[in-house]
Image (spheres, grey):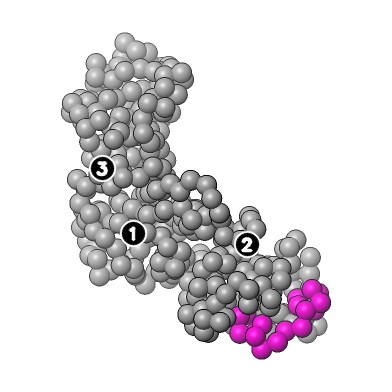
Amino acid sequence: MSTLNIINKSPFEKRTLDQCLKRIGAGDSVLLIEDASISAVSGTAFTEQLTAAAAQSKLYVLQPDLQARGFNDASLLDSIESVDYEGFVNLVVTHERVHSWL
Amino acid sequence: MTIEVNGKSLETDEEGYLADLNEWEPDVATVMAGIDDCELSDNHWEVINFLRDYYEEYQIAPAVRVLTKAIGKKLGKDKGSSKYLYELYPYGPAKQACKYAGLPKPTGCV
Amino acid sequence: MEEEEYQGGEVKKFLYVNRRLPHGTIYALESLETVLIGAAFDQDVSMLFVDDGVYQLKKEQAPESIECKNFSKTYRALEMYDVEKLFVERESLEERGLAIDDLLVDVELIASSDVKALVDEHDVILSF
């Protein structure tokens, strides 16, 4: 049973990322979009937490959102995969449900 | 839209629901029923008063299924039926009776 | 909507996840209204309260003081709408110095570590 969790808030402003990560488990995925995309960049205060989460969950970032904010795939954490809009749709259809953490 | 009740002009929305719940008084129901060519009997009032109490307690106008069940519980099984309530309020018990009672349109009715 | 009962169609299991304080934003009220609509359409509906969402069920709310509608009373009507269950995360309550006695309805307490299993039991997750 797997859930695609979508986060769109910056972890520096809101605690949504943390609130999500502590309540998901093996097989679940997290997609970072909009303002949350910057959490996928390596060397932030959230690098450690995301690296730990990647041990049991797949982590993705929406590339156009990251690019819009001045980062590219080279700045990403190794444990995070970048997806385009088509990849976003694929994630939605390959998971049993979506939990959008508004 | 407005309706005239005891010399006062009360505002309603485009479907005839009272804009300000606090402006309700029993004559509001009588006037609204008059517009629909309906004369209010004791049985009509029983439902109106029930709805006002329900709203006071739960802050919502109940969906028709919930209303039917709750009326049956409080006023007796014979009254807790769609047939009985639709005979009293042919436009729909939740919609028409809620309107007369000064409540907003029931949640779930779009 | 017609005032007949909703007939036919697939019944799905909905879980509404409530994560915010009431009154400061519209989220809690919007969630509650969506729950009532879902339940009127005979869907199988449960609610989960986590983080600041647990404050939505706090007893003795009097938002009339800030000219807001006291929709906390409406949580007590959910039973009549056949809303299956109200789940509250224990850790969220404890973090805020609250206990089950502070809540205005009967709820089922669950541990943070059981939230995933609860989510897994549902078809649709709506987060507010």
Which residue matches tag 1? C86
Q: Is residue B34 visible?
A: yes
Q: Are marks 2 and 1 in contact (CB under 8 Å)?
A: no
What's the magenta bit mostly, secondary-structure-wise? helix
The subunit carrying tag 1 is C
Q: Is residue C111 above or below residue A90?
A: below
- Near mark 2 (Cα within 10 A), the count class, few <14, some 14-19 or many ≥20, is some
Amino acid of disc 2:
Glu
The answer to whether marks 2 and 1 sit on the same chain is: yes
Indicate the position of residue C91 as horizontal and vertical percent values. Answer: 21, 53
Q: Earlier in the sequence, mark 2 or mark 1?
A: 2
Q: Secondary structure at mark 3?
A: helix
Q: Is residue B108 left or right of residue B91?
A: left
Q: Which residues are magenta?
A: B32-48
Q: Are marks 3 and 1 in contact (CB under 8 Å)?
A: no
Amino acid of disc 1:
Leu
What residue occupies the far top of the structure in this picture? Answer: A74
Which residue matches tag 2? C3
- Which quadrant of the structure image shows residue B19? bottom right
The subunit carrying tag 3 is C
Name the residue: 34% across, 68% down: C105
The subunit carrying tag 2 is C
Residue B46 belongs to magenta span: yes
Residue in front for this viewpoint, B53 or B75: B75
| Alpha-carbon span between mark 3 and mark 2 | 37 Å
